[in-house]
Amino acid sequence: MKLDSNIPYKIYLTEEELPRAWYNVRADMINKPAPLLNPETHKPMTAEELSVVFCDELVAQELNETDREIPIPDDIRDFYKMYRPAPLVRAYCLEEKLQTPAKIYYKFEGNNTSGSHKLNSAIAQAHYAKKQGLKGVTTETGAGQWGTALSMACSYYGLDCKVFMVKCSYEQKPFRREVMRTYGASVTPSPSMETKVGRAILKEHPGTAGSLGCAISEAVEVATGLDGYRYVLGSVLNQVMLHQSIIGLETKTAMDKYNIVPDIIIGCAGGGSNLGGLIAPFMGEKLRGERDYQFIAVEPKSCPSLTRGVYAYDYCDTGAVCPLAKMYTLGSNFIPSASHAGGLRYHGMSSTLSQLYADGYMEARSVEQTKVFEAAEYFARIEGILPAPESSHAIRVAIDEALKCKETGEEKTILFGLTGTGYFDMYAYEKFHNGIMNDYIPSDEELQASFARLPKVEE
């Protein structure tokens, strides 16, 4: 392996270089994301209405489209220092194995107990809940990374944490569930018989493996029915994109130190927190006309909201109790197959990323599950990190782009986000190794049936 004498294998920032403010990409967007709508009146949600569900300061962040920088409270920044700054890694071994002229970098977010980038927003949302004097919070989780991160954050602040975990992940990832319980959270498989909306979903879809949309509905119902509780979300919302911008801010600072400019930036895309966080400051430069980048969102073919969805107002949850968001969606009633990338099984995409995609600032690709795990195994054997199925979608396309460079001789610089480890996903790796993993892809008929149930909203 031949190392570049000018570029370390791992680039670390100092604690002093840790960002002091999150970056709000909406401030630089010409076309702002469409507002959230009240599910009953179809009118834009007010701060007062949103405060019934979310913490007050998080509502302010959700609605803020003008301030480019939002200061990070000292308490949160001090917590970040437990595991941040996170390293930017030059994938020298992967480059050599592929025999590509491309330079490959990845931002690794797995160096914390939760095992993923989700802690960046979990600790922020728990901080604001504690500051407001709440007793606890409720949430949903797909693969379990968000639930794990939130349970850890709530334990730190002494808050109660109630997690509704998508049923197929609850069954596939029992150890992830036990980590949440270790931190004091209660974990319920969703849909459940514990809520009105859960019972209704089970009646319409008996035996369902669940979805993030189902789990969101249950968590919101419980939060709004308990005094002193609020609901918190691990992706999709503007506030979450804001908190996750610390990923991109650190990455850009590290690259700027060594005069590295990425040509292609790749992230997996489910609800959008990972992708949105990684690309934020780079997208800001593109929006301001300062520099151009190629952004690629990678999603599973089993849940292809950007590549096969429609851009329309839709419910954020299956039970239709949450606000309506304008986004690329497969329909809130769409329940994807029980794929192993549980964190990418959401029916819609962040309204911010949806607007950027609609305006042509980024592209999207969808990949089959088996091809994702081929890339994950290849990466693990070469780079020595066992990646989560979600992040492996980005790895798949990063390898594809590096191989294109091999064919053309172009020396492009590729950056992707490695936002989680796969040590709680061995059931999925076992399926892959045993040759019994399938690639379910929804038919056009299935999607059209779901689109037909989208709410009728006049814009």
Image (cartoon, rainbow, N blue to C red):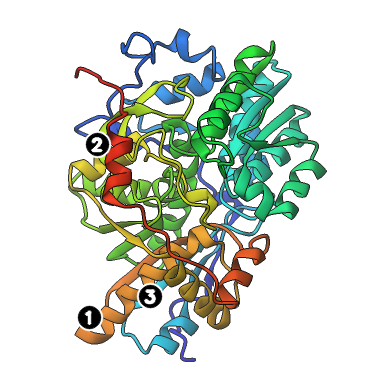
Q: Which tag is nearer the camera, tag 2 or tag 1? A: 2
Marks 3 and 2: CB-CB under 8 Å? no
Mark 1 lies on residue: 410
Residue located 40% across and 68% down the image: 258
Q: In the image, is residue 459 above or below residue 410?
A: above
Residue 324 in the image: x percent, y percent? 36, 23
Q: Between tags 3 and 2, which lies in front?
A: 2
At 41% from the left and 63% from the top, the residue drawn is 394
User: Foreground: 47 or 3?
Assistant: 47
115 shown above or below 31: below
First of labels 3, 2 by sequence position = 2
Other-residue count near label 2 (Cα within 10 Å), few / some / many at <14 / 14–19 / ≥20: many
Helix, strand or loop at disc 2? strand
Q: Residue at x 26, y 80 (%)?
A: 405
Instruction: Give how far apart the Cα atoms at labels 1 and 3 are.
Output: 14 Å
Q: Residues within 10 Å of mark 3 (few under 14, many from 20)?
A: many
Which mark sits nearer the N-terminus, 2 or 1?
Answer: 2
Drawn side of residue 368 relative to residue 180, left or right: left
The kind of residue on which mark 3 rests is: Ile
Tell me if I can see residue 343 in this picture: yes
The crowding category of the residue bearing disc 1, from other C-alpha atoms within 10 Å (few below 14, some 14 to 19, many at least 20), is: few
Residue 240 in the image: state x and y as whole percent: 48, 36
How many numbered tags mark residues here?
A: 3
Residue annotated with mark 2: 311
Q: Is residue 36 above or below residue 245?
A: above
* Cα distance in 3D space between marks 2 and 1: 35 Å
Disc number for residue 399: 3
What residue type is disc 2 on? Answer: Tyr
Q: Is residue 184 left or right of residue 36?
A: right
**Element on which disc 1 rests:** loop
Q: Is residue 64 visible?
A: no
